[in-house]
Amino acid sequence: MNFERIKEKLEVLADAAKYDVSCASSGSTRKNTNKGLGNSSGMGICHSYTEDGRCVSLLKILLTNYCIFDCAYCVTRKSNDIKRAAFQVQEVVDLTIQFYRRNYIEGLFLSSGIFKNADYTMERLVRVAKKLREEENFNGYIHLKSIPGASDELMREAGLYADRLSVNIEIPTEQGLKKLAPDKNREDFIKPMRKVKQEIQVYRSEKKKFRHTPVYAPAGQSTQMIIGASGESDAQIMYTSAYFYKKFQMKRVYYSGYIPISYDPRLPAIGTEVPMMRENRLYQTDWLLRFYGFDIRELLNKETPNLDMDIDPKLSWALRNLSFFPVDINTADKSWLARIPGIGMKSVHKILSGRRHQTIRWYDLKRMGVALNRAQYFIHCPGSPHTHKDHTSAQIKGLIMSQSTSKYQHAYNGQLNLFQSATTALVS
């Protein structure tokens, strides 16, 4: 192996891979049963943190940054004057094993630009995973990016060797995709997702009948979309997410704020990055949809097309629906406890468990982890101050914000105003 040449490729292709944020993982139970290398059970990947505080990582690279497409938002688009490089299949295999043996990584996240065509590229990604599993006996975590338009046969084979598969839908709406990537077809993104979903369903069905059914993509599939590049509202973004969660049983949808990289009239101006707070609010909304029982139409609709940057989406919903409050902590069911601002799911379970034995009082809630500075306006229990009775939504919001100790509370305002000015000019 020519180490200088490999090092040069690694610098180029690892840097190009940083724009893909969908590399966290969970749900894989691939066990080391044959004295091979690695074990992906019970751990996250890519500098994620496990429940016991361990930080784990993976080798995150592109197979190549050559690409036949010219997507306006992509740093590896064919018209961009950047240094190009490409790994050979065996080079990626050798890097993964050598990095693992040195305890640098615990898995591989492999994506690629599209060279020649979708199947040509996808076949090489699959060959990397297959060599790692069959020739190197590697049992660590492998995440492969599915190439839009890849054949069903390749997608089936990919899932037999990878723990997770993902294809980025890139732009939230079909109109936005046509505007910024006119050579791409939305159906090409859907096709591999559909195949992965079908194969996972087949695996689960056959597993009930046949004990030794080959495992297929045990960590499921995920996707990612770029936000802020084509002017979509938060409602358009989250309605798209809700659709993919429901239609394709996605494990995760990731939201990546667009970073201006070129002078293109179709895109926001350089220097107007998407505020981190917007990404944060989208992830909070995503969490409410997946774990708190909210319907997307409750959080975002024609009257509320964008998320409130001042407060979290659950509090924003509560302030728009004060008629549902206060909620009695000692009688409300699980679904209503989960809708109270300041009460997370861990606290919900503590409340449900605790009230089986005693009446929950005001001083019990803090010990259960409830954020009383928010919850106090929406609950009732023995000893509660009843502060909700004489305040309007605007007053409650003002009181909560005045008591906020978040370091992000004031940091985003200037950045947000700059971004909004640029995007307003873009879509007008």
Image (cartoon, rainbow, N blue to C red):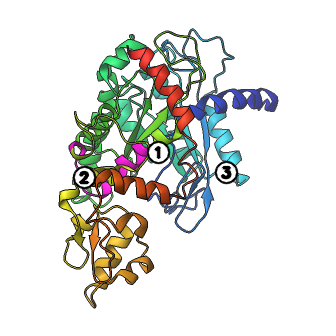
Q: Which residue in the protein does label 1 denote?
A: 280
Q: Position of residue 22 (x, y in %)?
A: 48, 41
Across and down, in percent, residue 314 comes to 33, 53
Residues tagged 2 and 1 counted as in contact (Cβ below 8 A): no
Mark 2 or mark 3, whichever is nearer to me: 2
Task: Estimate the x, y position of residue 266 in percent, counting from the top left.
Answer: 46, 12
Which residue corresponds to mark 2? 294
Q: Residue at x 66, y 46 (%)?
A: 97
Reading the image, the residue beneath label 3 is 100
Earlier along the polypeptide chain: callout 3 or callout 1? 3
Task: Look at label 1 and name its amino acid.
Answer: Asn
Is residue 10 shown in magenta?
A: no
Horizontal relation, residue 293 to residue 184: left or right? left
Q: Magenta segment, which residues? A: 281-297
Query: Would you say 94 lies left or right of 196 here?
Result: right
How far, Cα to Cα, is label 3 from label 1? Answer: 32 Å
**How far is the residue under mark 2 from the one under mark 1?**
17 Å
Element under disc 1: helix
Front-most of 223 and 231?
A: 231
